[in-house]
């Protein structure tokens, strides 16, 4: 358990924890009491305060000695005297060290605490944290207030000063909502960036446009077009969450001197897992089976209702990059024979580690495979790489699985092939477009599984993708080596 | 139609909902003279003495004392699949009838299905499919998420042939593997799949993100997973059952799922099969059920048929019976 978690566990009541870098951390103690637990909590809080160079009080408590002895500043002593009276109005003034902003704190019942845009809620001179006594607190802050939270009576608040360095502006589509970035990812982004939503940007282009140095693109949003690029003079990087960048016009973006980064490492495990999930579900007719199991019309389970084997079957992987290789690692454990087709052959050790055989000609792979899995990224060269001819080369007992991009497949040819049993079945995590129009023939076939592009749709992957995107964007902004930059051809 | 040279074997029926597969009949008829239950009943007196083996395909024909009494020359019951909880072994032993099953060939298919269920449940595959094809879908929501299988902790209860094959597959997903078994496997076997032995089932239940049941059904494993065990599991855990429905106390499972004591369940087996159409398990969003398809592939069923044929032939020629089930 981290120091903070340990501390929190000792306190009773609700905890509202905003940032472990300590923008605003508030704890609610439900009631004052003199019992052992309380004493322990106080002792721990003293240590905590020393650790983050903050301090704290409890209602009508004397300041802990560790605090008073380490503080020299008169103004702070003044402050500490005053806030011991519940409901007191306090302001901490005085000249702050050069380069720091002055803030005032007023304490009074029924007022609100606020978190500034940069996270700094209260600061007193001398580079230490301010502390608000229980009751309530109000800040008059020269920063932009973006969020207000009511404090509970008897709550203890610890505020830590944030570094003065201005956080770079990051444009995102939205917070929450249908297409927006989810809350916990927003919190992650806020640690490193000053977030600006598309709405805020459009409402105040003049001021915001210069601030934006980076754009976070998630699930293809926001759309990065010429107009946007023209209105962001200080834009340095587009950080894409996910590995596919076929939705970005790399050449155009490059012409503006803007770099593009993606997240190849974060997506690999979850996408390989979905490829395996689709292969297994299709082979064993899992979706159909689950429908039979729960259908109101089912009276018995037919014993001649069969699927096809995965173990010891032949898997042909088209695209042996990071994800393709992870698929091979998993498939090997199912004793599958693994063929692969790739722009270039992998090294011998890599091939042997997964028992993969290189097929220089894709046709060879198609003819021999029981399962064909597309794991390539979409480029102008490989649009519709799987069409009528390729489907015709596949075994009639074969299954096509697509975890790349919908446009890799000639969808009309696929419909025909499935209708005429040219191949046995298909399992697609990606289509073109997404979602398909509701009258599309693919939706009506019974030998197809479609999933709504969930290759990286796990709690863990979403987090890792944001972290990888952040690392990439910061590397660009700090002039450091960029882990995953994507270049136009 | 009777061929005097081939031994007579009783089967339930051909085709229909639970009969011997039409495609298998040709092979079987090369080795046996097949007598259906219908044919036998119509001509008990003569056929009763001729029948020397029963080819039991998916628990049919049902064997009771009455039948055994009227088949004086019955030597063996060859049962399909690995489970034999549907047979009264004591009864058969009293009549001097041997029993065989088809243990190892079902292992890989069943292990594959265990993995399929784990992946489908964790990644919400069936839900996702329904969204992808639903006429009401206008867009794919951004925050629709499942949970990762790679790197998670899998607890295997029952590390026999099937359980071990599950472990082999799970290892490739970089899962942490715990197992509970009547006896510990040897060190090489454990190291090969990176499996850690949990002598106490409680330890496995507490630490696992996925709990997979791969035991056979015996009086000891009957209702092995009940309220207590479910409470020990993480609230974020999924229970996967590829063994037998009766290994789980089903009512306790329903309650646990309703109260979010565990996150989800994926069941290839229930009790009974199928469940009554008004059973609560059928309506729960966090439950995936498949119609007992653990070994339901063409290849495996064909191999099972070949296996059973071998066992019958061995019994009738007094040779050692492959895959004999001993009391």
Image (cartoon, coloured by chain):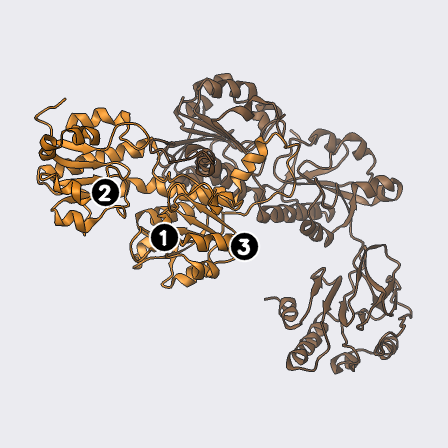
First reached walking from the N terminus: tag 3 or tag 2: 2
- A181 vs A206, left or right, is left
A343 and B218: which is toward the camera = B218
When the figure is inspected, residue A422 is found, relative to residue A162, above or below; the finding is above
- B159 vs A105, left or right, is left
Q: Position of residue A190 (x, y in %)?
A: 73, 52
Q: Position of residue B246 (x, y in %)?
A: 36, 51
Which chain comes out brown in the rendered image? A
Farthest-out residue, right: A94
> Residue B260 shows which numbered tag?
3
What residue lies at 78% left-to-right and 82% top-to-bottom? A62
Residue topped by disc 2? B101
Quadrant for the N terminus of chain A, please.
bottom right
> Residue B247 shows which numbered tag?
1
Report the mark closest to the observer, 3 or 2.
Answer: 3
Residue A390 in sight here: no
- Circle 3 Cα neighbour tier, 10 Å, few/some/many (<14 / 14–19 / ≥20): some
């Amino acid at each position: 358990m981290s120091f903070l978690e340990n501390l929190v566990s000792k306190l009773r009541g609700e905890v509202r924890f905003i940032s472990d870098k300590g923008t605003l951390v508030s704890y609610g103690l439900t009631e004052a009491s003199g019992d052992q637990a309380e004493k322990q909590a106080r002792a721990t809080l003293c240590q905590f305060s020393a650790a983050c160079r903050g301090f704290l009080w409890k209602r009508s408590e004397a300041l802990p000695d560790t605090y008073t002895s380490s503080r020299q500043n008169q103004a702070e002593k003044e402050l500490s005297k005053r806030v011991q009276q519940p409901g007191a109005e306090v302001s901490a003034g005085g000249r702050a060290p050069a380069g720091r902003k002055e803030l005032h704190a007023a304490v009074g019942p029924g007022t609100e605490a606020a978190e500034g845009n940069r996270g700094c809620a209260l600061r007193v001179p001398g580079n230490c944290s301010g502390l608000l006594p229980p009751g309530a607190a109000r800040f008059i802050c020269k920063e932009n207030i973006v969020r207000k939270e009511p404090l509970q009576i008897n709550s203890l608040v610890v505020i830590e000063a944030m570094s003065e360095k201005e956080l770079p502006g990051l444009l995102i589509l939205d917070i929450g909502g249908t297409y927006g970035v989810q809350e916990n990812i927003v919190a992650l982004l806020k640690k490193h960036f000053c977030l600006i939503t598309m709405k805020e940007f459009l409402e105040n282009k003049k001021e915001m446009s210069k601030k934006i140095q980076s754009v976070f693109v998630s699930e293809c949003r926001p759309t990065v077009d010429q107009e946007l690029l023209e209105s962001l003079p200080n834009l340095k990087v587009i950080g894409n969450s996910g590995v596919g960048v076929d939705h970005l016009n790399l050449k155009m973006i490059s012409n503006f001197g803007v770099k593009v980064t993606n997240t190849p490492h974060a997506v690999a495990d979850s996408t390989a897992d979905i490829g395996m999930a689709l292969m297994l579900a299709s082979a064993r007719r899992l979706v159909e089976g689950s429908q039979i199991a729960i259908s109101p019309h089912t009276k018995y389970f037919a014993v001649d209702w069969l699927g096809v084997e995965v173990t010891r079957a032949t898997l042909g992987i088209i695209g042996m990059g990071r994800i393709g290789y992870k698929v091979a690692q998993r498939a090997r454990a199912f004793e599958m024979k693994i063929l692969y087709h790739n722009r270039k052959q992998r090294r011998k050790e890599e091939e042997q580690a997964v028992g993969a055989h290189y097929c220089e000609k894709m046709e060879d792979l198609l003819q021999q495979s029981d399962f064909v899995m597309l794991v390539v990224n979409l480029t102008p060269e490989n649009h519709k790489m799987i069409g009528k001819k390729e489907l015709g080369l596949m075994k009639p007992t074969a299954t096509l699985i697509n975890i790349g991009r919908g446009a890799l497949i000639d969808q009309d040819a696929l419909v025909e092939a499935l209708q005429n049993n040219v191949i046995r079945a298909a399992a697609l995590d990606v289509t073109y477009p997404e979602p398909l129009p509701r009258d599309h023939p693919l939706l009506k076939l019974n030998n197809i599984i479609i999933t709504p592009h969930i290759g990286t749709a796990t709690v863990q992957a979403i987090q890792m993708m944001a972290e990888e995107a952040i690392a990439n964007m910061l590397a660009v902004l700090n002039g450091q080596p960029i882990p995953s930059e994507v270049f136009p051809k | 139609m009777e061929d005097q040279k081939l031994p007579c074997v009783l089967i339930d029926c051909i085709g229909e909902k639970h009969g011997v597969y039409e495609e298998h009949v040709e092979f079987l008829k090369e080795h046996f003279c097949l007598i259906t239950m219908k044919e036998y009943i119509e001509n008990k007196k003569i056929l009763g003495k001729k029948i020397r083996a029963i080819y039991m395909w998916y628990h049919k024909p049902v064997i009771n004392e009455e039948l055994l009494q009227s088949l004086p020359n019955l030597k063996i019951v060859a049962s399909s699949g690995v489970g034999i909880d549907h047979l009264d072994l004591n009864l058969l032993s009293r009549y001097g009838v041997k029993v065989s099953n088809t243990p190892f060939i079902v292992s890989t298919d069943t292990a594959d299905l265990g993995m399929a269920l784990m992946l489908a449940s964790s990644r919400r595959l069936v839900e996702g499919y329904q969204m992808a094809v639903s006429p009401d879908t206008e867009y794919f929501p951004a925050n629709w998420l499942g949970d990762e299988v790679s790197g998670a902790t899998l607890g295997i209860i029952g590390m026999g042939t099937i359980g071990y094959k599950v472990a082999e597959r799970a290892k490739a997903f970089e899962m942490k593997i715990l197992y509970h078994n009547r006896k510990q496997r040897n060190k090489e076997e454990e190291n090969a799949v990176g499996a850690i032995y949990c002598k106490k089932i409680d330890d496995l239940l507490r630490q696992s993100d996925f709990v997979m049941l791969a035991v056979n059904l015996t009086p000891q494993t009957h209702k092995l997973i009940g309220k207590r065990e479910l409470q020990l599991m993480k609230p974020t855990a999924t229970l996967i059952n590829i063994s037998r429905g009766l290994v789980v106390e089903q009512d306790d499972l329903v309650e646990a799922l309703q109260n979010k004591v565990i996150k989800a369940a994926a069941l290839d087996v229930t009790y009974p099969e199928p469940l009554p159409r008004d059973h609560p398990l059928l309506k729960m969003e966090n439950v995936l059920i498949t119609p007992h398809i653990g070994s339901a592939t063409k290849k495996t069923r064909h191999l099972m048929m070949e296996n059973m044929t071998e066992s019958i032939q061995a019994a009738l020629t007094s040779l050692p019976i492959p895959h004999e089930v001993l009391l």
